Amino acid sequence: MTVHMTKSNIRTITKEELAEKIKNVQPVQIVNVLDPKQYNLGLIKGSKKIPLDQLDSRLGELDRNIEVVTYCASYDCPASHKAAEKLFTRGFRVSAYEGGITEWKEAGLPME
């Protein structure tokens, strides 16, 4: 697996890497950190909906022993990275999927 480190030390994950984790049923928590107004964009199959502004109050919904992957709308959206930074500082193993739901949908990957 390729691990990309950004300047803030948050790992990023590609759509291929995330799709592989899902396909191989690897334990991973996929978190849509978009505002509920943007849920019409769609959801990656199996993701939890925890908006960025609710992340602190909903940390108990995530298991610290299982990797977390955050995503938002697209490469132009900073929410996935901000959420990953927040989780990282709280001791989670986390990656940001920066392509977001836009790239995922365009690739024809599993959605719900």
Image (spheres, rainbow, N blue to C red):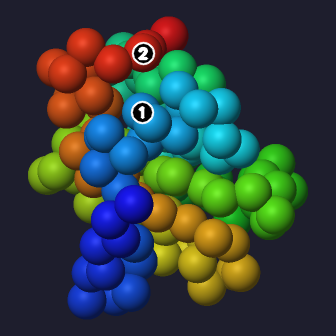
Whole-percent x, y for residue 99 in the image:
23, 44
* Most foreground residue, 29 or 17: 17
Looking at the rendered structure, the kind of residue marked 2 is Pro
* Most foreground residue, 111 or 51: 111
Do the residues under discs 1 and 2 have CB atoms within 8 angstroms? yes
Q: Is residue 20 left or right of residue 104?
A: right
**Residue 109 is drawn in which quadrant?**
top left
The mark found on residue 110 in the picture is 2
* Most foreground residue, 86 or 9: 9
Looking at the rendered structure, the kind of residue marked 1 is Ala
The mark found on residue 47 in the picture is none
Q: Say above or below: 87 vs 46.
A: below
- Earlier in the chain: of badge 1 and badge 2, it is 1
Q: Quadrant of the N terminus?
A: bottom left
Q: Is residue 29 left or right of residue 62?
A: left
Whole-percent x, y for residue 93 in the image:
63, 70
* SS class, disc 1: helix
Callout 2: 10 Å neighbours few (<14), some, many (20+)? Answer: some
Residue drawn 82% across the image and 48% down it: 61
Residue at mark 1 to residue at mark 2: CA–CA distance: 8 Å
- Residue 9 visible in the shown view: yes
Give the residue number, with chain letter if any, for mark 1. 19
